[in-house]
């Protein structure tokens, strides 16, 4: 399985939700069918894939490339559409822990050069004028 060609896919789900996954290409059709037949991930069982949309699929990757691509796409979709609207990579469970939410929020803030305290641009945490707070979860 390590030497197989891998694919990364993005599913468009009900209620403007997204799921990102990766799998060896030879198993892709079967895995997509499971998602569409309500036998996929817990996330795609809760928010069903839209029958009218086609998944975005990237093929021909190594296992490491697929893992990295799935990781990057998961953060991209979380940053673009909201953490509560996307699951994938290591964040595939329906309910994320406080630690996971903090890690994702910090990563998004870092990627956008935002303050880790107030999440606004133009300064960093050590010069933030807002009272230092914990994450608002």
Image (cartoon, rainbow, N blue to C red):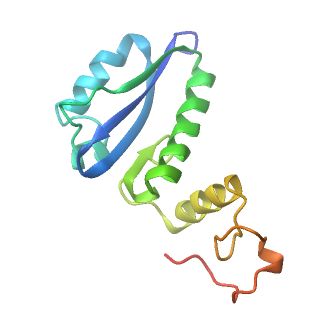
Q: Position of residue 10 (x, y in %)?
A: 40, 33
State the residue lying farthest toward the front.
122
User: Considering depth in this image, is 2 or 94 the residue closer to the camera?
Assistant: 94
Q: Position of residue 47 (x, y in %)?
A: 24, 47
Q: Could you tell me which residue is drawn at 67 percent across and 55 percent down? A: 112
Left or right of 59? Residue 33 is: left
Give the quadrant of residue 96.
bottom left
Give the quadrant of residue 55.
top left
User: Considering depth in this image, is 126 or 104 the residue closer to the camera?
Assistant: 126
Q: In the displayed structure, would residue 44 be above or below residue 37? A: below
State the residue lying farthest toward the bottom.
131
Task: Tell me if I can see residue 93 in this picture.
Answer: no
Task: Tell me if I can see residue 14 in this picture.
Answer: yes
State the residue lying farthest toward the right.
126
Q: In the displayed structure, would residue 75 be above or below residue 32? A: below
Q: Position of residue 63 (x, y in %)?
A: 58, 20
Q: Could you tell me which residue is drawn at 55 percent across and 46 percent down? A: 75
Q: In the displayed structure, would residue 92 be above or below residue 110? A: above
Q: Position of residue 127 (x, y in %)?
A: 82, 79
Left or right of 107? Residue 4 is: left
Left or right of 103? Residue 124 is: right
Q: Could you tell me which residue is drawn at 75 percent across and 69 percent down? A: 122
User: Considering depth in this image, is 52 or 100 the residue closer to the camera?
Assistant: 52
């Amino acid at each position: 399985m390590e030497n197989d060609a891998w694919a990364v896919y993005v599913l468009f789900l009900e209620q403007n939700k997204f799921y990102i996954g990766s799998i060896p290409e030879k198993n892709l059709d079967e895995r997509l069918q499971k998602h569409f037949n309500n036998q996929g991930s817990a996330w795609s069982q809760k928010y069903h894939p839209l029958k009218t949309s086609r998944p975005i699929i990237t093929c021909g990757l190594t296992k490491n490339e697929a893992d990295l691509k799935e990781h990057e796409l998961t953060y991209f979709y979380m940053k673009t559409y909201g953490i509560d609207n996307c699951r994938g990579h290591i964040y595939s469970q329906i309910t994320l822990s406080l630690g996971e939410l903090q890690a994702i929020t910090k990563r998004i803030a870092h990627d956008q050069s935002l303050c880790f305290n107030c999440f606004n641009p133009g300064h960093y945490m050590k010069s933030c004028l807002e009272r230092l707070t914990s994450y608002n979860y």
